[in-house]
Amino acid sequence: MSKRILALATLALLCLCAEGAVVFKNGLKTVATAGTAVPLAAVSTTAKWATIQALSTNTGTVCFGGAPVASTRSGTCLTAGLAAPLNEYPGQTYDLGTILLDSTVSGEGASYTYVY
């Protein structure tokens, strides 16, 4: 690669970072006791958008949403491997610490990927 092309590529990358490059993060949450909802994130976690996916090893159903959420089909419910997006809304963010997760089977849960 020529020095000029490398310099242009580096400049483009610096410009992208200066404008706020997209940063992906992820997490995993399990429900210790079925029927007892837990926060998706342990602390307040701001996200522009996120995807929540039931673990592929789950044998039951996981449900997520605001209070009250329950594994008895309250909120958005997913079976093993299924995912649901939390879409981006211009100017709005999600706090993943306020989203609750519950499961029909103790020890099962969901993974999540988000952009902040």
Image (spheres, helix red, strand yellow):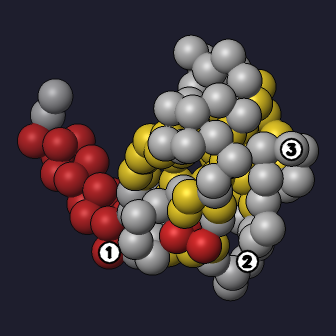
Q: What residue does disc 3 label?
A: 72
Q: What residue does disc 2 label?
A: 90
User: In the image, 105: left or right of 78?
Assistant: left
Where residue 87 sits, quadrant-wise, is bottom right
- Amino acid type of the residue that numbered disc 3 sits on in the rendered structure: Thr
Can you say whether 70 is above or below 112 in the image? below
Q: Nearer the viewer, residue 21 or 43?
A: 43
Can you say whether 4 is above or below 16 in the image? above
Whichever of callouts 1 and 3 sits on the residue coming sooner in the sequence is 1
Q: Nearer the viewer, mark 3 or mark 2?
A: 3
> In x, y percent, where is residue 96?
55, 66
- SS at mark 3? loop
- Who's the residue at 16% across and 28% down the image? 1
- Amino acid type of the residue that numbered disc 1 sits on in the rendered structure: Ala
Q: In 3D space, how far apart are the residues under numbered discs 1 and 3 (Cα atoms)? A: 46 Å
Asked whether the residues under the numbered discs 3 and 2 touch, taking CB atoms below 8 Å apart as contact, a structural biologist would say no
Q: Nearer the viewer, mark 2 or mark 1?
A: 2
- Who's the residue at 60% across and 73% down the image? 98
Q: In 3D space, how far apart are the residues under numbered discs 3 and 2 (Cα atoms)? A: 32 Å
